Amino acid sequence: MVRRLTPEEPPSRLAIWSRRLALFALAVALFAIVLVRGSFVEAVPGFAVLAGALALAALAILAALGAFVVIWVNGNPGLGRALLGLTVGLGLVAYPAYIAATGYDLPPIADISTDTADPPQFEVVARVRPRGANPIAYPGPEAARQQRAAYPDIMPLQFAANPQVVYRAVLDALRQHKGLLIIDERSPRPGGRDGRIEAVARTTIMGFRDDVVVRVRARGGGTVVDIRSASRYGTRDFGTNARRIRSLAEAIEDEIGNHPEASR
C-alpha cells in the first residue's frame, strides 16, 4: 500500500517577520547604545537611531499579534517565532514607555536648580558643550514657575558649618556618586569666592550626557549648597534632572553626616 505524505503547513509569515523585526530592532538598539556611550555621536543622532529601533520593535509586536490570529484561525506553525518577536519587542519598548508615561504630566522643562532666582552658573561646561546643544543660560522665570509647581521639594541645602568644611564633604559625595564625572572644582575662599564643582552626568542605559554644577556659598554663620542639573538636548527631561538633584542632595547630606564638624 502506498502511503501519501501530507504536506506540512508553512509557518506564519507574520510570525517569521515578527522575529526578524524584533531581532533587528535589538541589534539597532545595541548599536545606538554603543554609538552614544562610546562617544562616537552626540545625543541627537544617537536618539534618532534608538527611535528607529523602537519603531521596528513596535512593528514586531504588531506582526506577532497578527501572527497569533493567523495561527489560531488557520493552525499554521510559528507560535515560537511570534512569541520571541513579541517578547523582544515588548522588552525594547517597555522602559521608554514607562519613562514617557510617568513623565507625561511633568512640565516641558529640562533645566532644574535649587535656586531659581540666582541659579549656579556653568563655566567650564559652557566651553565643552557641543554646538547645537541647549543654551547654557537658565531658561528664566516661566521655567522657574513650572519647576516650583512640579517639584516643590527642590530647595537649597543649608548647613551650620563653614563653607570650606561643607565643600570638602560635597566634593567627597560627588566623587562617590555613580555616573558622575567631575570636570572642574574650585574651593571657596574666605571673604567672598563661592565654591563650585562642575560635572557631567550620564544616563544609565544610553549614556546621554547632562550637566551638573554645585555651588557652595557662605550665608550668615553657615553655608548654603545649591545644585543645578540641565539636559544638553531636548526641552523635556521627564523628571530626570529633578531625580538627579534629589539623589545628589541625599548623598551630600549623608556625607555631611560623616563630618561631625559640618552637622546641620
Image (tube, helix red, strand yellow):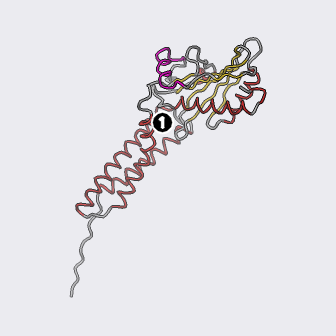
| Residue 4 lies in the magenta-colored region | no
Q: Residue at position x 30%, y 62% from top?
A: 11
Residue 139 screen position, x and y as percent: 50, 17
Which quadrant is the N terminus positioned in?
bottom left
Q: Which amino acid type is shown beneath numbered disc 1?
A: Gly
Left or right position of 180 against 74? right
- Could you say which quadrant of the image residue 198 lies in? top right
At 66% from the left edge and 28% from the top edge, which residue is drawn? 183
Residue at the (48%, 36%) spot, across then down: 46
**Location of mark 1 (residue):** 46
Image position, residue 84 (x, y; %): 40, 56
Q: Main secondary structure of the magenta part?
A: helix
Residue at the top extreme, as displayed: 191
Name above or below for residue 62 compared with residue 50.
below
Closest to the observer: 222 or 176?
222
Q: Nearer the viewer, residue 148 or 73?
A: 148
Q: Find residue 5 and report its horizontal and vertical position in percent.
A: 24, 77
| Residue nearest the viewer, comparing 95 with 211 | 95
* Label 1 CA crowd tier, 10 Å (few <14, some 14–19, many 20+): many
Horizontal and vertical percent for residue 65? 31, 52
Q: Magenta residues, as a range?
A: 137-152
Residue 114 in the image: above or below residue 104: above
Give the structural element (helix, strand or loop) at label 1. Answer: helix
Report if residue 145 lies within the magenta region: yes
Relative to residue 39, is residue 44 drawn left or right? left
Q: Is residue 8 above or below residue 56?
A: below
Task: Please identify the quarter of the rendering in which residue 121 is found.
Answer: top right
Quarter of the picture containing the C terminus is top right
In depth, the one of 4 and 86 nearer the eye is 86
Q: Furthest residue to the bottom? A: 1
- Asked whether, in this view, residue 144 is left or right of residue 90, the answer is right
